[in-house]
Image (spheres, helix red, strand yellow):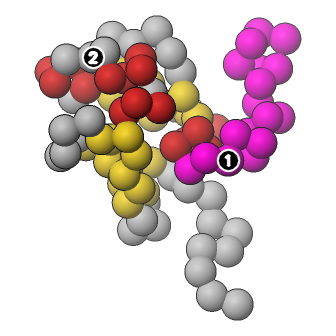
Amino acid sequence: MEGFIGVSPEVKKITFTQRGKMDMHFVDGRTVIVPLSHFPSIKKLTTAQRKHWYVMPDGLFSFDDCPEVFHVEQVLGKEEAYRYLKPKLEGA
């Protein structure tokens, strides 16, 4: 079996090299490019504000001037993979 089996995605860097897209670079060498239309909170940020991102434990990330907290699995389209975190995120 080949591929990224059993590898948890860990964000290394977030860039915006193409208009309307977010590039997420992972520690394991992968880069995923997603349209910002799926992330309206990030799309609303200015170019300067997008440079101020940060990573939190458990695959979470956000931006200084963004009220939303995102999970890396949202970028990968695998929301079900982090559902176990929802009670922690919602304060339950």
Dot 2 amino acid type: Leu
Judge whether residue 78 is colored magenta.
Answer: yes
* Residue stretch rendered in magenta on the structure: 76-92
SS state under label 1: loop
Residue 14 appears in the rendering: no
Label 2 crowding class (10 Å Cα cut-off): few <14, some 14-19, many 20+? some
Q: Residue at x 54, y 28 (%)?
A: 70
- Position of residue 79 measured from the top left corner of the image (x, y, whole percent): 70, 40
Q: What's the distance in space between the residues labelled 2 and 1, CA to CA?
A: 24 Å
* Quadrant of the snapshot with the N terminus: bottom right
The residue tagged 2 is: 45
Q: Residue at x 41, y 56 (%)?
A: 32
* Quadrant of the snapshot with the C terminus: top right
Q: Residue at x 62, y 58 (%)?
A: 8
Decide which of tag 2 and tag 1 comes sooner along the chain.
2
- Position of residue 37 measured from the top left corner of the image (x, y, whole percent): 40, 30
Judge whether residue 17 is colored magenta.
Answer: no
User: Total number of numbered labels?
Assistant: 2
Give the vertical position of 28 relative to 48 (above or below): below
Apparent side of residue 14 relative to residue 46 in the rendered image (left or right): right
The residue tagged 1 is: 78
Residue 32 appears in the rendering: yes
